[in-house]
Amino acid sequence: MYQSVLTGGNQAPVDAEELQFQLYRMQDNLKEIAKRWKVVGIDQTKEDKWVVVYAQNDGDSCKVMLNDCETAYRGKWDFSIHATYSDDQAIHIGDIKGPANKGYGSICMNYLKEIAKDQNIPSITGDIAKRDWDHVDRLVHFYEKHDFKVSIDYEEQAGEIEWNAMQ
């Protein structure tokens, strides 16, 4: 058991000092984040970095946010999915903000799906807009990886996504 924590599974050993630093930072970040937000989880990225996941949910909109434990929480998230409740049947993703290829999007998407399931909301929808076109292939890969149905109109540079809990 101890070896798996220090080795990060099948990867090279994690520096014990770095791991200890992340855990201390996580403790501090949790205290600060919990003052303003609902902490929904602690997770690890694909690079075995610890993150704190938290949410804001007012019944009209929902944000799933994430902070890494390598830096101090300063009141701003490192990654966020912004969504609204279209009705009692769908959550609509308005925007995804943050760095690519760190695993943050996958972590936040899994928590957004849990929020939908917990509230008996069967689907998550969204649009792929013209402003997203410079990274549309990455978006298609991301949504398909998370079991979304993706429809793209390459001529109009637009698209739609939908995830259904009943699939």
Image: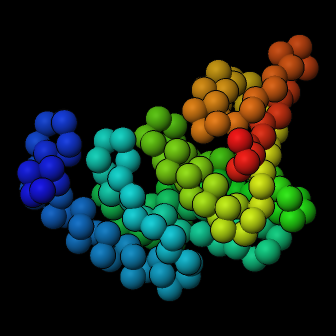
Q: Is residue 58 left or right of residue 137?
A: right
Between 34 and 11, the residue placed more toward the observer is 11
Residue 81 image-quadrant placement: bottom right
- The answer to whether residue 133 is above or below residue 87 is above
Residue 154 image-quadrant placement: top right
Furthest residue in direction top, as rendered: 155
- The answer to whether residue 30 is above or below residue 86 is below
Which residue appears at 33% of the width and 61% of the height?
A: 69
Coordinates of residue 14 in the picture (x, y in percent)? 14, 47
Coordinates of residue 155 in the picture (x, y in percent)? 89, 14
Coordinates of residue 91 in the picture (x, y in percent)? 79, 57
Between 65 and 43, the residue placed more toward the observer is 43
Q: Quadrant of the C terminus?
A: top right
Residue 84 image-quadrant placement: bottom right
Between 31 and 6, the residue placed more toward the observer is 6
Which residue appears at 80% of the width and 46% of the height?
A: 125
Q: From this viewpoint, is residue 159 visible?
A: yes
Q: Quadrant of the N terminus?
A: bottom left
Furthest residue in direction bottom, as rendered: 35
Coordinates of residue 99 in the picture (x, y in percent)? 51, 42
Q: Is residue 63 left or right of residue 16?
A: right
Task: Count the labels in the image.
Answer: 0
Q: Is residue 153 left or right of residue 113?
A: right
* Colouring of the image: rainbow
- The answer to whether residue 163 is above or below residue 75 is above
Which residue appears at 19% of the width and 36% of the height?
A: 10
